[in-house]
Image: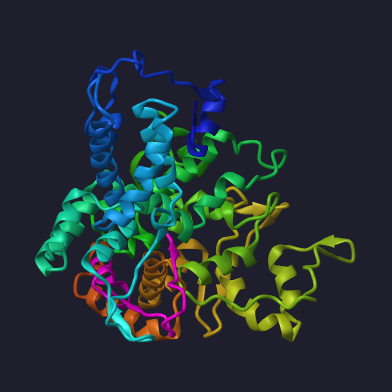
């Protein structure tokens, strides 16, 4: 059975499609290759004859296992890698057929730590605690995991084996090829999903009584809007500042209606130019971000401000103290607006230090409700979207927030690089990584901060190409889990 992914299952629910079961291949008991699908042919590069000897079967199994193990381990393999798997094949072959024995062998391969984890072993002549350059095959594995969340393909592997992958022009061409591949959608699914918190959207549930318009198809559309927006910037090699203030997005008719935008028909999302009257633009004008940073039944300027500090400015505030008081929703029986609640909260010096940075950013977005729809009034009161930054900068609404972030675009570029480098390395960054971030930003500035230039600079950076050996010779090699 093949279960629909979370992305599509919610939309499919309305059509009563919860599960699809595919049966096959038919005629799989035959000894000829007619039963094979395109995917099985990738596994069974050879098939023994019906009356094959045990030796010929073992030779075919060795060919299959050697090739697949090389791909799975992301490096050249030797007899010590192959022999344990062939032993599993031989044991299984006593009870079942050739293909079933290969399947059992592949099960063992797929649970091997060398497949599940990115293993980078220092050369024998590297001193404990010293920094060394990873091998070309290890570099190819890092590159494929970064851009594809997958294994190196034959072209990458061949270039790495020939020692040519790191040649500047070759590497530049390979990065371009990889980003043009459909596999690069992994950057949208995984990097953007983590950076923007899009992975959390299927688990965020606005109040259905407060927001009955937030249907399952609309939830799907707001997520796809942001994913298509990110993909557009990636595929077309646009400047990363489009994330801040792009005057286009991806809408369909229900989402355009949710935004109050006319002239968009049909259910397919397509690129739409945004006017100033649309009150949209960039990530902060998209309902996915505005919904994720809200509570189920009302907005949260604190969450929105913190999201901006965390993800767009890399200036995360410290965690709140354990005894922080809750916001007071009313005073003398009168409901307080979010602005009034936060003003009272900032009166506490313990709270003011962080809230003076977060609150202005979030209050500027108060004209967007908890599911990202634009509004000018709340609880029969006009919404005040004005704000003042700690440095005295005054601004109002999303357009004013765009100006504030544009003035801090160099800080945003470093924040984006911080997140991308973290993703590429599979580890948190340290103080010694900060010069690398600044260096990548300087390189990117020479090409208008286009996203491909930033990716190339990450791939050629010292942290991506070098690694520190364990401090002691008997210290176990550290593993990084492959994304």
- Does the magenta run of residues contain 466? yes
Specify whether residue 265 is in view: no
State the image coordinates of residue 472 (x, y, percent, origin top left): 44, 84
Most foreground residue, 110 or 465: 110
The region drawn magenta spans 454-483
Q: Residue at x 57, y 44 (%)?
A: 202
Instruction: Find residue 184 and report its horizontal and vertical position in percent.
Output: 30, 50
- Colour mapping: rainbow
* Residue 210 percent location from the top left of the image: 71, 42
Q: Is residue 327 left or right of residue 473?
A: right
Q: Residue at x 24, y 53 (%)?
A: 179
Q: Is residue 194 left or right of residue 26?
A: right
**Pick the front one: 339 or 116:** 116
* Residue furthest to the top: 27
Q: Nearer the viewer, residue 122 or 439?
A: 122
Residue at left offset 11%, top offset 68%: 167
Q: Residue at x 37, y 66 (%)?
A: 420
Q: Tell me: 204 left or right of 275.
A: right
Which quarter of the figure is the C terminus placed in?
A: bottom left
Would residue 65 be seen by someone viewing this image from the given angle? yes
State the image coordinates of residue 476 (x, y, percent, origin top left): 46, 74
Q: What is the total number of numbered labels drawn onto the structure image?
A: 0
- Where on the picture, by quarter, is residue 164? bottom left
Is 259 within the magenta? no
The foreground one among 100 and 38 is: 100
């Amino acid at each position: 059975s093949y279960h629909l992914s979370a992305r599509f299952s919610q939309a499919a629910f309305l059509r009563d499609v919860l599960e699809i079961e595919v049966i096959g291949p038919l005629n799989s008991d035959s000894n000829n290759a007619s039963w094979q699908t395109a995917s099985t042919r990738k596994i069974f590069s050879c098939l023994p004859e019906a009356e094959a000897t045990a030796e010929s079967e073992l030779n075919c199994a060795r060919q299959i296992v050697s090739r697949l193990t090389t791909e799975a381990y992301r490096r050249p393999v030797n007899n010590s890698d192959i022999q344990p798997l062939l032993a599993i094949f031989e044991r299984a072959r006593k009870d079942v057929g050739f293909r079933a024995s290969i399947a059992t062998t592949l099960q063992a391969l797929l649970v091997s730590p060398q497949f599940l984890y990115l293993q980078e072993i220092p050369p024998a002549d590297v001193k404990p605690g010293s920094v060394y350059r990873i091998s070309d095959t290890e570099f190819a594995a890092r590159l494929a995991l970064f851009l594809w969340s997958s294994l190196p393909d034959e072209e990458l592997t061949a270039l790495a084996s020939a020692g040519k992958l790191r040649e500047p022009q070759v590497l530049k061409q390979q990065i371009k090829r990889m980003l043009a591949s459909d596999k690069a959608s992994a950057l949208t699914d995984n990097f953007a999903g983590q950076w923007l918190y899009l992975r959390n959207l299927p688990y965020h549930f606005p109040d259905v009584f407060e927001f009955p318009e937030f249907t399952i198809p609309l939830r799907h559309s707001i997520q796809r809007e942001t994913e298509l927006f990110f993909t557009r910037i990636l595929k077309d090699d646009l400047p990363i500042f489009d994330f801040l203030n792009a005057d286009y997005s991806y809408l369909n008719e229900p989402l355009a209606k949710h935004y109050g935008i006319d002239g968009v028909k049909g259910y397919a999302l397509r690129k739409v130019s945004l006017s100033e009257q649309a009150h949209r633009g960039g990530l902060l004008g998209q309902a996915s971000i505005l919904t994720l940073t809200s509570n189920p039944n009302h907005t949260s300027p604190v969450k929105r401000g913190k999201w901006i500090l965390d993800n767009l400015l890399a200036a995360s505030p410290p965690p709140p103290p354990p005894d922080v008081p809750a916001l007071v929703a009313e005073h003398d029986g009168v409901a307080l607006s979010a602005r009034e609640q936060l003003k009272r909260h900032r009166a506490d010096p313990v709270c003011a230090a962080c809230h003076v940075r977060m609150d202005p950013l979030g209050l500027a977005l108060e004209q967007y409700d908890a599911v990202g729809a634009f509004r000018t009034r709340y609880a029969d009161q006009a919404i005040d979207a004005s704000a003042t930054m700690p440095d005295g900068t005054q601004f109002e609404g999303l357009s004013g927030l765009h100006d504030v972030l544009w003035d801090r675009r160099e800080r945003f570029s470093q924040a984006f690089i911080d997140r991308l480098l973290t993703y590429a390395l599979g580890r948190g960054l340290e103080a010694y990584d900060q010069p690398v971030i600044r260096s990548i930003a300087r390189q990117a500035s020479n090409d208008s901060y286009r996203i491909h230039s930033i990716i190339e600079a990450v791939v050629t950076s010292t942290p991506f190409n070098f690694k520190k050996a364990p401090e002691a010779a008997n210290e176990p090699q550290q593993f990084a889990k492959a994304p």
